[in-house]
Image: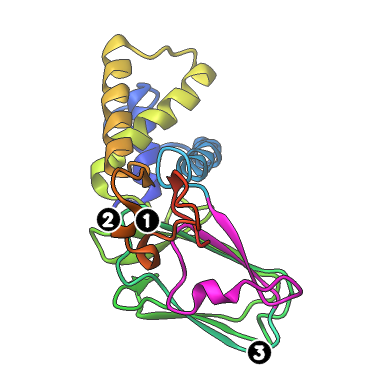
Amino acid sequence: MTLVSEIIKGAYRELNVIPLGADPTANQTTEALAKLNTLILTTVGNEVGDELTDVNYGGDYDQSEYTNEWVPSNTRLMCNLTSALTLDLDPRPFDGQRLSLVDNGGNFATYNVTLDGNGRNIEGASTLTISTDDYTGQWMYRSDTGNWVKIEELEDTDEMPFPVEFDDYFTQMLAVRLNSRYGQAMSADGAMMLRRWRSAIRSRYRRRDLRMMTDPGLVRRDEYGYDDNFSIGRASPW
């Protein structure tokens, strides 16, 4: 696993702002950390993974029926709870699949929510219980570790949520965000490598937009979740 501090240090080395073996100053770390958090949060759902579909759990427009077996892929659960809740996650998640949870009712401390990895882990454990009012959070599935990782603003002592093979992507992207502050310009070689790394991360987490290429009667609706017209587009819970 790679620490956020290593990505920040690598970005300053790319810019030749700090010498080999040196560490960024506290102010440099603070500045870079803010930019890196923005990069990670905008990568998820854009270069990596699909956008989220809102599903109401509880309330006047309850759609909890869509979670009877497990939470559909790329779902944001908007919760208005009147009792504690246990949710099974997808038993066959794909790399970059996303999940989000929002406490619209502001009562998770009273009505806890337990997320069951359903054969996988979430934040390193088989289950995760959330008991904080007004909670909001999102996770991304990593197939290399069999774990749903939390996507949130990071500290420099935290681990990167992505596999180590994409360290260079985030290092170079962060260097691009910082270079104008130090009067630096990206070299042609750096730009070429950044295109390569961007292509690699997009390929690894390619969109799961499915297209109907055969008779809809041959497709399992419970697996892909197409609507009644088997419309073209990304899978959804309805």
Which callout, 2 or 1, points at the residue further toward the start of the chain? Answer: 2
Q: Could you tell me which residue is drawn at 47 percent across and 47 percent down?
A: 231
Instruction: Say which amino acid is labelled 2.
Output: Met
Q: Which residues are magenta?
A: 52-80
In front of the other: 4 or 169:
169
In front of the other: 130 or 86:
86
Q: Could you tell me which residue is drawn at 26 percent across and 14 percent down?
A: 189
Closer mark to the observer between disc 1 and disc 3: 3
- State whether residue 22 appears in this view: no
Q: How far apart are the alpha carbons under marks 1 and 3?
A: 34 Å
In this figure, which residue is indicated by the disc labeled 2?
1
Q: Could you tell me which residue is drawn at 34 percent across and 50 percent down?
A: 162
**Quarter of the image holding residue 175?**
top left
Residue 92's spot in the image, x, y percent?
A: 30, 67
Residue 103's spot in the image, x, y percent?
A: 67, 71
Instruction: Say which amino acid is labelled 3.
Output: Ser
Task: Identify the disc placed on residue 83.
Answer: 3
- Mark 2 Cα shell of 10 Å, populated few (<14), some (14-19), many (≥20): few
- Specify whether residue 71 is painted magenta: yes
In front of the other: 212 or 47:
212
**Quarter of the image holding residue 195?**
top left
Q: From this view, report whether residue 164 is shown above or below residue 191.
A: below
In this figure, which residue is indicated by the disc labeled 1?
159
> Are the residues at dot 2 and dot 1 in contact (C-beta closer than 8 Å)?
yes
Helix, strand or loop at disc 1?
Answer: loop
Which callout, 2 or 3, points at the residue further toward the start of the chain? Answer: 2
Task: Identify the disc placed on residue 96.
Answer: none
Residue 204's spot in the image, x, y percent?
A: 27, 42
Helix, strand or loop at disc 3?
Answer: loop
